[in-house]
Image: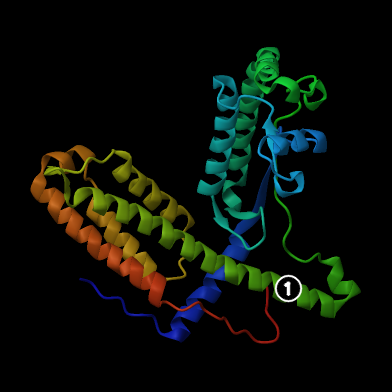
Amino acid sequence: MSTTTLEEPETATLQAIQAAQRLRTTMAATRVSFTWLGVHKTLSPEQKAQAADRFDAEAKFISASKKLLDTQHPRFRAVTAVRGKILQHWKDQTLPYPEPGVRLIQQKEIDRFDRTLQAYQRELARAVSDLDSTYAELRDVARERLGRLFNPSDYPISLRDEFAVTWDFPGVEPPNYLQQLNPALYEQQCQRVQARFDEAVQLAEQAFLEELSKLVEHLAERLSGADDGKPKVFRDSAVDNLGEFFDRFRRLNVRSNEQLDGVVERARNLVQGVQPQELRDNAQLRGRMATQLSNVQASLDGLMVDRPRRSILRSPRSETP
């Protein structure tokens, strides 16, 4: 069982400050937004009253809605799948930021990110066009299933403008003109932005810790023990997902925590070059891997539980690098 020793407070604070400065100078804020058709609608007061009568209930104590379209239809699911891919790509290429709907992307990756989302935007448009071609059929099915709850006014004429994705890169730094207009307010805003990047460092650490912990715990659990006397079954993705994590960590690591870096490197060395089928065929390798991953998990648990949340103290003036 490995042990985890916390960094000296001064060292940890210095690393965090340097990491926040790196984030602030090398990354940009990015935001992804969707226009998306709502497929549920609250029942009218009259309809809700009718529903309440069936259960001898008072209408004001129940809530009820109707589903306008079959979201399990293959073409509707295809549209939803594109949205899922866009969100996953956005999260894979970015780090969290303490502002709702905003994440941080490396400035050097903005052009590639923009091209990728343009491609997804075209894919979404094609999927929506396919869905729209079956829209009349979907409404007919809804009319049959909803009965008296069906209302034609709930449905747009076409679906082509009901689904869209946009993205932008909002500014998070205080505007330069504010420095001339109100130096004190400008300084206050600089301090606020720096505090957000300080928090972004901690959010990044926490996100990496939690993701790696889940991946390691899952694989270790599947490699250890047995079901009905036989080794537990696991998918290739249990190993492949770790490889993807290590690639993302290498690209986005803010280098704020030497202990986290060390644990990630230990985990990477354990699974590097190991193929899923090897673990299925080699009982000795499987057992050894399970034990070593459990040790890594113990170190991760120590980092998550024992490491205090940092409070970074700064001088009254915080210089933007």
Q: Position of 151 compared to 63: left or right?
A: right
Residue drawn 30% across the image and 76% down it: 4
Residue drawn 81% across the image and 38% down it: 45
Q: Around disc 1, counting alpha carbons within 10 Å, would you say few (fewer than 14), some (14 to 19), or many (20 or more)?
A: many
Q: Is residue 251 above or below residue 321?
A: above
Q: Nearer the viewer, residue 87 or 25?
A: 87
The amino acid marked with disc number 1 is Cys
- Where is residue 208 drawn, in percent x and y? 44, 59
Residue drawn 48% across the image and 75% down it: 15
- Does residue 35 appear in the picture of this structure? no
The image quadrant that residue 6 belongs to is bottom left
Which residue has dot 1 on it? 190
Q: Nearer the viewer, residue 153 or 97?
A: 153
- Where is residue 56 drawn, in percent x and y? 69, 41
Q: Position of 290 compared to 89: left or right?
A: left
- Does residue 51 appear in the picture of this structure? yes
- Where is residue 253 drawn, in percent x and y? 46, 60
- Where is residue 83 drawn, in percent x and y? 59, 35
Residue drawn 59% across the image and 84% down it: 313
Q: Position of 120 compared to 210: left or right?
A: right
Q: Is residue 46 above or below residue 168?
A: above
- In the rendered image, the quadrant that contains the N terminus is bottom left
**Seen from this angle, which residue lies furthest left?**
284
**Seen from this angle, which residue lies furthest right?**
181
- In the rendered image, the quadrant that contains the C terminus is bottom right
The image quadrant that residue 74 belongs to is top right
Q: Is residue 171 above or below residue 196?
A: above
Q: Position of 131 compared to 269: left or right?
A: right
Q: Secondary structure at mark 1?
A: helix
Q: Nearer the viewer, residue 158 or 91?
A: 158
